[in-house]
Image (cartoon, helix red, strand yellow):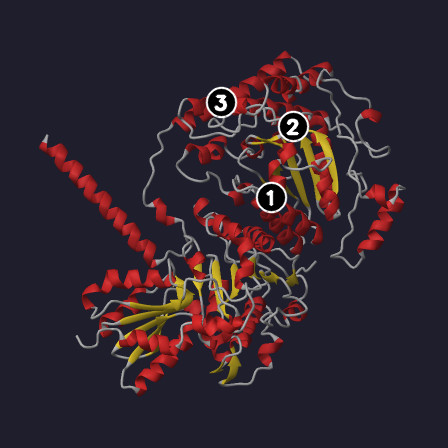
Amino acid sequence: MSPTITTSSEANGNVSAATARAAASAAASAEAAGPQPVTMAKALNTALTDAMSADSSVLVFGEDVGLLGGVFRITDGLTATFGEQRCFDTPLAESGIVGMAVGMAINGMRPVIEMQFDAFAYPAFEQIVSHVAKMHNRTKGAVKLPLVIRIPYGGGIGGVEHHCDSSESYYAHTAGLKVYTPATVADGYRMLREAIDSDDPVIFMEPKKMYWTKDQVDLGELRRHHAEGTTAGRTSEGRAAVARPGTDATLIAYGPSVPTALAAAEAAALEGRSLEVIDVRTIVPFDDETVCESVRKTGRAVVIAEAHGFASVSSEIVARVQERCFHYLAAPIRRVTGFDVPYPAPKLEKYYLPGVDRILDAVDDLQWEN
Amino acid sequence: MTISGDHTAPDTTSTESAGTALTDAVKKFGITVEDYMLPARHQIQMVDPDGRLIPEGEQGTQPGHEYPVPGDKELLAAYGQLVVGRRVNDQNSALVRQGRMAVYPSSHGQEACQVAAALCLSEGDWMFPTYRDAVAVMTRGVDPVQVMTIFRGDWHGGYDPLEYKVGIQCTPLTTQLLHAVGVAHAAKLRGEDTVVLAMCGDGATSEGDFHEALNFAAVFHLPVIFFVQNNKYAISVPLAHQSVAPSLAHKAVGYGMAGERVDGNDVVALLAVLDRAVKLAREGSGPLLVEANTYRMQAHTNADDDTRYRENSEVAEWRAKDPVNRMRTYLTDRGLLDDDGEARIRERAEAVAAQLREGLSEDVPVDPQELFRHVFARQTPQLTEEAALLADELARDAAATDSKEAGK
């Protein structure tokens, strides 16, 4: 029994004066100063470490997250640093993991739970849709559920069936859930810290093919910015980013499709076309303002997503932009998405996934002769 | 295995290994490993349907593990709540017939379970009820009108779960058992001695979350009491279609958990068993399962027709086992209850019924903007926009009505 675990000071239950504010973690002090090559996995791991150091009510649990550090190693070292009480393996049952997290959040904790793969989260769907999403509304805000459900998602890794789904549309369609998905290493850190701080439940979709992507990142600076941002009330929620400025057309993407969109913009530039890339960042809430501002400027748009196109986040984006920017459009908005088929076997996935060529073809179709 | 007074399940979360704990338990009870893993052969019954106290050796317990009869004060309090609970059940059914409540799943006939589930807990403990457990929630101390708000139709819940330490009255079956596990787990991590009572019915034991909740509670060695009210029907489907286990208490075996069967219409036995279960759980026994053998005397809800799936004779058979009459006879025979006492209790029950009639007949004004207010702790721009859309629509409607009035 750990006497250091106390009630979350932010959400339900009594504020505990004894809330432990641990000193900066060993990992942090061992960090090199200044920008370094950092993977998305490392950024997420650092975010978890820092959040657990800052607030003893933050708990991590799921399948294989303990000794193994998760099948993608995102929780590596957390059990060693914080003990088995705060980062632990559960029985192999996703509904159980989410349901227990709901109870823990009701009773003053901030659980950050891992669904091992996108398609393995489906047994938890009832808990997510019927309770995680609805508890705040049902109790008129009396019960807050400050929990984060981390889900590695998407394909492009040559994975077998049930390991490559893009399941974000199910969650985005459910009223009461926030849905975040980072596309850069820095956002991996920033957005996970903010998801853990949030008093609303957050489905945190991690683009698994980007876990080993490296960016030049200064983790110490990100940590300081997070502290300052929290004080100033600044968050990433509902704020899309202009990942690459441009003038001729807008590519709207999120998560694993952002690097693909950036590669397409790079290729288009060689052909003399300036494409702006918008990284949606938080699907719910959606940043209509930034997206529409870009489309009004360029007059043309392509939405890119790995998920099936039919009745999806990409269809929602097209609908929203069309409703708000119709008179600015020089051409119908195009989509480049996964086909409406079950996610294919590894040798077929290159035909399924939105790629640079397919995006450029869609851009070519945007009625440039007008 | 029965819930013996010195029961402790193996705690694999402690340094002690499961094997050692099992061996110790076997030594302690002087029984074989096979016996240890079997649930009680008989249900515990302490007062028979005619209100007579059953001799100690015939109450269904294993020798040496008898349950003491609860104290007079507790029994009288339980009887008072039984009478109030019955009155509330019948008042609510009447309010549904009058169209003042949308629906009410009555626990008529199950009041002993409802009352005991609430009375066995201390103030700091938690309860996770189902939609049929309104009387238990009320007995726990939640304002009756707030409890019934969920059935009145103006919001999906009427009380603050944190204030009363009572979960929402859960409709999706057994999903709340996992919330109970989480609440107990959080409390255990903080070193608090909270006990959590999680309620479900017989049909619900078929759900996956039932299995996951029992398993999680056992693996993490949590102080959760799973209280199964076996009322014989899941809407129309009888128990035989849910499970062919010898009893629902047998379900405990697979999780390494003790299980007990109790006469669910005998509030004396229910209190005795649940009081012991709460005490054991608080002292670190790990989770326990209690199956109450009871009967749903009325249809599932007013929308159900129970003559399609059960015989009147079966219902009549259970009417003879009524929990309220049984307790009245027992207390009267023991000299604990006289006409004055009975009158005072009836008066209290009538007062609660009047409170419900008044509270639920109120034409509660609804605020359309409440649709948007509580979805998130931090509102999204999309919902702000939608709220403005509805406000505008309503303002135009109101203006149109005003001009029509003015034109008359």
- Residue type at mark 3 is Gln
- Residue type at mark 1 is Glu
- Residue type at mark 2 is Thr
Work out which quarter of the rendered image holds the C terminus of chain A and state it. Answer: bottom left
In front of the other: B274 or B311: B311
Q: Quadrant of residue B210?
A: top right
Q: How crowded is mark 3: few (under 14 residues within 10 Å), some or many (20 or more)?
A: some
Q: Estimate the x, y position of residue A304 in percent, counting from the top left.
A: 37, 70
Q: How far apart are marks 2 and 3 (CA)?
A: 21 Å
Q: Work out whether residue B400 can be spotted.
A: yes
Q: What element carries label 2?
A: loop
Q: Residues within 10 Å of mark 2 (few under 14, many from 20)?
A: many
Identify residue for label 2. Answer: B294
Q: In this view, does A278 lie above or below A90?
A: below
Q: Is residue A331 above or below residue A94?
A: below
The residue located at (54%, 21%) in the rendering is: B307
Q: Which chain carries label 2?
A: B
Q: Is residue A31 above or below residue A190?
A: below
Which of discs 2 and 3 lies nearer the camera? The answer is 2
Identify residue for label 1. Answer: B207
